[in-house]
Amino acid sequence: MSKLPGLFDIFDNLDQIPVENIARWLKPQPSLAYIENFLAQRILYPQTIPITEADLKMDLAILREALRMQGPKDKKATALLGDNPFLNTTLRKILIPSKFLNFIPDLKILTYVFVDGLLLDRKREDFFEDLWTIELSGEISEVIGSLLIPQFKDKRGILQLRIGDKNYQIHPGTLIVIPCFKDRCEAIFKLKQGKILGKEDLAVEVYGGKLGLMVDGRER
Amino acid sequence: MTHFVQRRVRIEKDIIARIYRTLPGKGKLSVALGQEVIPEEIIGTGQFSSGFRILNLSNLLEVPPGEIKKYLTKQINSRIYNGELLAYKKGWLLKKARVVTCPVDGILDFINEEVGEIRITRLPEKMNLPAGVYGVIEAFDQNLGQVVIRTQVSRIYGLCGTGKMRDGILHVLTKKYDLAGRSMISAKFDGSILVNGSLISKDTIMAGISDGVNGIITGGINASDYKSIAGGRLIFPKKLENDIGISIVVCEGFGAQALGEDIYELLSTFEDRFIQLDGNSATVNLPSYQSSCMNRIRKHKLSDDQTLSLTDTQLVDLKIGARVRVVGPSYSAEQGQIISIDKSKTLLSSKVSAYLVTIETARRKIRVPANNVEYLG
């Protein structure tokens, strides 16, 4: 049976997503019945593309929850591959299937959705998980940037970051993307009331690319 | 530039197909191989016990559920016949007296004072099985009480459904955009198949079961209601067969989705006619009611492995003039003809770029991404 490719056709358990979980990503929140019917239509017709901004937001909310549903699984069974098909926990990589760009072409939004779905509720196991490489996976893999997750002690924390000749200040609760188109970029940071990779100040080389460096200072 | 879209057959008109007629209980078939039959011809007789009927006396009498017992005119476990007085409440001042008569022959065997319902289990009755269609007997099995008839049908392929093969007389209950409330279902539809417009609720389905309705054809259904009648999952095509005592075929999708005009118009021509539907395979068979079809049925032989392969989707290149149906989130379920296909992509407000097609529907012209349509023909 031939079928057209779609954003959700790789997920075979979309109907198991609790509708309330999808609703929490949406403002204003549509009725649960509306969301459930929308989801059912997406299962029936995964090849369709959103027309309006509201349709896109629904798709993104479903994708976040579909990603969340992928893990963590039984660690004994998947010790080598990590606990999720979109996360390589050994190499600390976020793997975004490149075909998703056909349906969500904005790389920032797509990465944001993957970070929400995969890492926002994930228990951090060690400080190495403060830094992730973001990779587009498919026939040809391509590194597109890095994700930095500062560990703020409280809301007074500030991350001062220098990339190239530009300085940035990141406060708790914010998420930004800093352009960094080179293959590798030097990031010099200093944290007040917090740490990255177990340090308060450090200079590290991170992967750059089409996306750049995403810094996620949101509370976990 | 080619734009592949999915093709889904919704209707096949006037095809020669096999249909199955089964005795509702133990009995005897009176047919021979190769025999030609007409719709009203009796092809078997059996003893039939069609289960039970539930009546909500609390609603019918307008009394609290715990008080229904004192208005009953029959004792529990007593026999009661169709049309006999079942319950009576005297009128008082401006309030009219309430009279409830029994809709079937049966035994009053259960009273539920928590919800105000009573159950009447039907008495076994002798029932004749009519052929229902013009056709030729291809096979029969006395043990199973089943007859295979080669006949001419128009077939509707729905999207999903639930319930085994059932048949009955078709009644179109609403217009294609409307929805049937539970108050529209009554005992007069016992054994019928009903056509509902855009949305069927769980309450209406329950009322259908209670009143002996055999099947419902609907445009849309809420996903939560569908899950509750189809085994709790949204998997298409369905892997497990279910039956809740009524067969449902959903033709358009989830939420309020008006029945497509192609399906609605075809069903309307079968008002008061015998039809069959199978919820589990989401198909509806509309047997031809014109005797002239016998010539085609006689000449046309079917292979042994006749299957419903048309439910599989295929890809076709979209061309101007094609009839399509919108399946995406906006303008969902609208049908029309392609009048133009863009040569370049358009950036949509969702920030996604797509090739748009212009569709002329009965009411307006709409522009949607080519990905969001399915090909009808």
Image: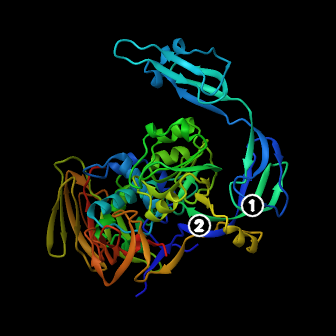
Residue B359 or residue B265, whichever sits in front: B265
Q: Pick whichever of labels 2 and 1 is earlier in the sequence.
A: 1
Residue B318 or residue A26, whichever sits in front: B318
* Label 1 CA crowd tier, 10 Å (few <14, some 14–19, many 20+): many
Residue that appears at 65% across and 66% down: B308
Mark pair 2, 1: CA separation = 22 Å
Asked whether, in this view, residue A85 is left or right of residue B51, the answer is left
Give the amino acid at mark 1: Ile
Residue A51 lies, with reference to residue B128, above or below; the image says below
Q: Does dot 1 land on a helix, a strand or a loop? A: strand
The x and y percentages for residue A145 are: 32, 72
Residue A174 or residue B347, whichever sits in front: B347
Asked whether, in this view, residue B107 is left or right of residue B206, the answer is right
The answer to whether one can see residue B56 in this image is: yes
Residue that appears at 48% across and 40% down: B204
Residue A142 or residue B105, whichever sits in front: B105
- Circle on res. A20: none
Asked whether, in this view, residue B259 is left or right of residue A211, the answer is right
Q: Chain of mark 1?
A: B
The x and y percentages for residue B329 are: 36, 62
User: Mark 1 = which residue?
Assistant: B149
User: Mark 2 = which residue?
Assistant: B311
Q: How many marks?
A: 2
The x and y percentages for residue B173 are: 47, 48
The x and y percentages for residue B69 are: 54, 14
